[in-house]
Image (cartoon, rainbow, N blue to C red):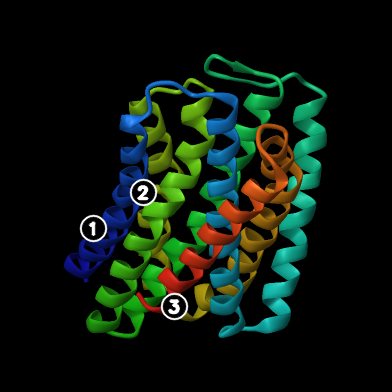
Amino acid sequence: MWLAVGQVFLFGLVTALATGLGALPFAFMREVSKRTLALAHAVASGLMLGASFGLIVEGSHYGTVQTLTGGMIGVVFILLGQQLLAGKGPAFGELRGAGARKVILILAVMTLHSFAEGVAVGVAFGGGEHLAVLITFAIAVHNVPEGLAISAVMRPKGASLAACAGWSIFSSLPQPLMAVPAFLFVDSFRALLPYGLGFAAGAMVLMVFLELLPEAYDGASRSTIGLWVSLTLGAMILFQRYL
């Protein structure tokens, strides 16, 4: 039993570490103009919307009503988070105000989203090792663009490459932590999974429309932003569909 538990934790840890790979493209960004910042937000928006689509589809396999309920809770979470952070002048490293709020919210959403993915890994192990390997690989590859989305918000605002990678990995640490209890109590955690997936989807969608897109439109034309969001959204959906 303990050997199996260690294996589950290791697989979950692999998915978390994969998130840090999303920061690599930003190793080649030396200067960040207002237009580059806008395009980075557009890319992050497309990736997050695409990921939300995949989460809703996955959640519906476990329960449509539960997924929608989780989505509404996610929307409320973002609205309350905005109000709370707006009133306190948040700080995140060297960031202050709106920039810090955006980073804090996206990290909070991605971290909470990782709880659901960790449960998915543990539940998959309950269905057999072959299924678990496939699910783990899918989540690990899926985590790379999620790390890219986090870095696309942090890097243009002055965060170091190490910070982008580190916080990306941090946002996925719930995956190995949740994989083990989900494996040990498969039936109980399977019932909660659609709520978690729906929560992440609802929170990410509202985050895109309230935080990322307004800033993107402020730095580039609507047609340019629309094009990049559409391209990355389509690419993310295809990526998940044919993985």
The image shows residue 240 at horizontal and vertical percentages of 43, 72
Left or right: 36 with respect to 182? right
Q: Are marks 1 and 2 in contact (CB under 8 Å)?
A: no
Q: How far is disc 3 from disc 1 in space, using C-alphas?
A: 26 Å
Task: Name the residue beneath numbered marker 3.
Answer: 241
Q: Residues within 10 Å of mark 2 (few under 14, many from 20)?
A: many
Left or right: 96 with respect to 166? right
The image shows residue 151 at horizontal and vertical percentages of 45, 37
Residue at image coords 38%, 78% = 242
Please say if 124 is above or below 38. Answer: below
Task: Name the residue beneath numbered marker 2.
Answer: 19
Residue at image coords 66%, 53% = 226
Left or right: 73 with respect to 182? right
Asked where in the image residue 142 lies, by quadrant, the reply is bottom left
Give the mark nearer the N terminus: 3 vs 2: 2
Q: Which residue occupies the foreground of this view, 147 or 239?
A: 239
Residue at image coords 31%, 68% = 136
Residue at image coords 61%, 82% = 60
Give the mark nearer the N terminus: 3 vs 1: 1
Please say if 165 is above or below 228. Answer: above
Helix, strand, or loop for circle 2? helix
Q: How far is disc 1 from disc 2 in space, using C-alphas?
A: 15 Å
Helix, strand, or loop for circle 3? helix
Q: Nearer the viewer, mark 3 or mark 1?
A: 3
The image shows residue 200 at horizontal and vertical percentages of 61, 59
Farthest left residue?
3
Give the mark nearer the N terminus: 1 vs 2: 1
The amino acid marked with disc number 3 is Arg
